[in-house]
Amino acid sequence: MIKDITLGQYFPGNSVVHKLDPRVKIILTLLYITALFIVTNFKGYIVFGLFTFIIISISTIPHRFVFKGLRPLLFIIVLTAFINMFMTKEGVILYGIGPLVATDKGVEMAIFMVLRLLFLIMGTSLLTLTTSPILLTDGIEKLLNPFKKIGVPAHELAMMMTIALRFIPTLLEETDKIMKAQMARGADFESGNLLKRAKGLVPLLVPLFISAFRRADELATAMESRCYRGGDQRTRMKQLITDKRDYIAIVVMIALIAALIMMRLL
């Protein structure tokens, strides 16, 4: 289950999506999220789903790899569907289980929320899957540069965000190693109810925190030994350049948003 988390992982490739300017990809991700919350009907979700799967196909990232990232969040998705199904009281009653009553509006809302979560996870994960940590840092820093005039530490914020994303797979791998080591010594993380399983994870926190602090200290030492001084007079081996494909991608996203707005109004 832990290895199924794809957040923060980078999938090397040479596709059009990989070659997009990281600044443009960040903006497109924000527009993608905005477009997702515009959809309010099944036709809109069909169009949005086709668009998402086309982008995933163009990125040459295997669909199974993208779907694998949904497995760790399956409990949250099911819980969201359950809450929306039985907490929506409007509409025609379809069936009831004691005090829990499901209506047609509740079922519709549950389906919409599940689709919204699925597309949100799949679409936003493409940002880290198709962008290397270095380019992602440069893109975030460039977008935050205008805020330097009001005292915002653009480079430091970009570096912290990228390091946090980069170390998610590392910490997950470390957690998996600790779990296997403790299971070899007789620890049980799979049997019992949910509360017992949660208590069983407590012994993982101490070695995991120690490992995280050790890695942070090693990273700080490595940066200092290389005379790292933040964004002041820092040069880059690869300069960010916006070309024709970036503008085409922006136009396509704006066209999608316009189409979804028209479908919502009509």
Image (tube, rainbow, N blue to C red):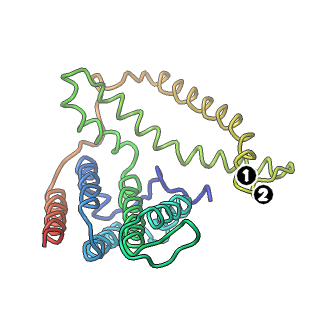
Q: Position of residue 159 (x, y in %)?
A: 39, 33
Q: Position of residue 122 (x, y in %)?
A: 40, 62
Disc on res. 197: 1
- Residues marked 2 and 1 touching at CB (< 8 Å): yes
Tell whether 195 sits left or right of 79: right
Secondary structure beneath dot 2 equals loop
Hey, what amino acid is under mark 1? Arg
Q: Position of residue 107 (x, y in %)?
A: 42, 72
Q: Residues within 10 Å of mark 1 (few under 14, many from 20)?
A: some
Position of residue 132 relative to residue 247, above or below, is above
Q: Who comes first in sequence, dot 2 or dot 1?
A: 2
Secondary structure beneath dot 1 equals helix
Hey, what amino acid is under mark 2? Gly
Disc on res. 192: 2
Give the position of the N terminus as an image quadrant: bottom right
The residue at the point 48 percent across, 43 percent down is: 166
Measured Cα–Cα span from mark 2 to mark 1: 6 Å
> In which image quadrant can residue 141 be found?
top left
